Image (cartoon, grey):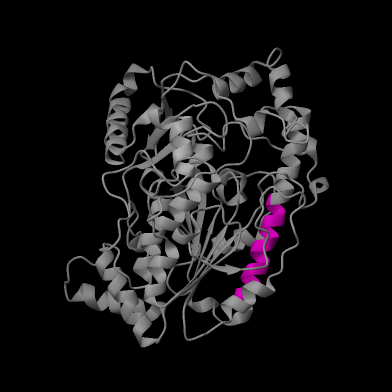
Amino acid sequence: MMLRITKMLSRRKFLGYAGLATAMFGSKLLRATAQKKQTKPNILMIVADDCTYNDLPIYGGQNESTPNIDRLASEGLVFNRAYLGSAMCQPCRAELYTGQYPMRNGCTWNHSASRPGTTSMPDHLRPLGYRVGLAGKVHVKPAKAFSFEKVGGFDESCTRNTTKPHDVRHTSRFIRGNKEQPFCLVIALVEPHVPWAMGDASKYEQQELVLPENIADTKLTREAFARYLAEITYMDGQVGEILKVLDESGRADNTLVIFTSEQGSQFPGCKWTNWDTGLHTALIARWPNIIRPGQRTNALVQYTDVLPTIVDIAGGDVFGHKYDGTSFLQVLLGRSSVHRKFVYGMYNNISEGPAYPTRTVSDGRYRYIRNLKPDEIFIEKHLMGWSGDGKLNNPYWSTWLSGSSTNRHTYRLVKRYMHRPGEQLYHTAKDPYELTDLADNPALSAVKSRLSAELDRWMQEQGDPGAALDTLQAHKAARRGSHMYGPAFSQ
């Protein structure tokens, strides 16, 4: 197939046709190829849960072993700069499945709901002839807006201790269904979400671990980090089993496989923040004979772009829906190394703790963050507090506090997490853990102004009122399905 596509591209180039690199040409080309084969490509998406992207070896992680994810990366395309719009499970999944930012689809808090009229992946792919299923964690609502066919075999609860055993036979049955009909299957795993109880943590010698720069070095933190790494290894094993089922089905050659790690882990400074380790996600795409293996791209993409890309590949109209994202098909085909200029993020803290709204924009090199209530302190009750059974959710957090009196680096991490200025600016390309705030650097005033203006534009476009959104009243309204704010139009 790759040779056929290459010949087609070369012939068109020779004839002098303009616009070879446009999304329109790419989708027409794939549609023509699919028509010749009497089939459309299948889509298999594997979603991890709460996995900081650069804890994975393919992004520089120095601890765990992930042979299956590594192999998938070697067979496909790795996105170096992929992002999501909110570092919380429910909003980022709603974004992934709808192609819309949190404000437009309505899911702007964890444990809230999208707008009742929202349409999602099943609504967009079924008219194109696809069976659309979801196995494992759902965590989006209302059900009518996310009408996936339910597929069994993977635990739906991310907080169960321990995770229920998985059974890939359900996956096999779905994949081996009507072979005349293409499928789209999302398998949403629950690892490495807390509680970190799966896998063998003893394989990770705690004193040998290389902790990320934004994680304080305490005994209990090392113990927790070892359990987190064990869950990543366990998750990698699940990825291997799923890919084996696909291989055995005989449909792998015509299947686009996408792997993504969701938002950052439940360590301070990752999940529930607008820092890079919260919003940056792993993204790998493997498509035999279409995507060249062993490639990496610096193209800037966001979860809002994934559904339009899939619809484009499936031969659908990417302009017929109210997407916030756009198709990056040309990046997959290797015909473009760029996609978007900016990625955006938002966070509202109600239900996780007291109000603490933040917004961000990044151009892939610099990140600008605006903390809308800088006089308050940040508190996230799950990470920093007690569970319902009277136990500390994360006992290591107290060792960060106690260690702050004797360790200057630990003190800086605690202060960075709990008390933030109104504006922050980071050179993320040089400072991936965003520990050096450059907002007051006069040499970067133009950078800060440019990004600040872009954030203003995006918030206005999205109908985002800022701090007024992160209130109990607005959150309760969203949970009822009655949204108080949003863009001028919505689905």
Image side of residue 161 versus residue 175, left or right: right
Q: Quadrant of residue 227?
A: top right
Q: Farthest residue toward the right?
A: 202
**Number of numbered labels in the structure image:** 0
Secondary structure mostly taken by the magenta-highlighted segment of the chain: helix
Q: Farthest residue toward the top?
A: 405
Which x, y percent locates residue 188? 59, 58
Which x, y percent locates residue 234? 72, 56
The magenta segment is 232-247
Residue at 37% x, 74% y: name it.
Answer: 127
- 63 vs 44: above or below: above
Which x, y percent locates residue 433? 53, 33
Image side of residue 221 versus residue 136, left or right: right
- 99 vs 390: above or below: below
Q: Is residue 158 magenta?
A: no
Q: Quadrant of residue 386?
A: top right
Q: Quick check: can you spot residue 429?
A: no
Which x, y percent locates residue 409? 63, 20
Residue at 65% x, 21% y: name it.
Answer: 410
Using the image as rendered, state which of residue 331 and residue 199 is in the foreground.
199
- 436 vs 235: above or below: above
Q: Quadrant of the C terminus?
A: bottom left
Image side of residue 70 versus residue 126, left or right: right
Residue at 80% x, 51% y: name it.
Answer: 200
Q: Quick check: can you spot residue 289?
A: yes
Q: Quadrant of the N terminus?
A: bottom left
- 267 vs 438: above or below: below
Using the image as rendered, state which of residue 242 and residue 287 is in the foreground.
242
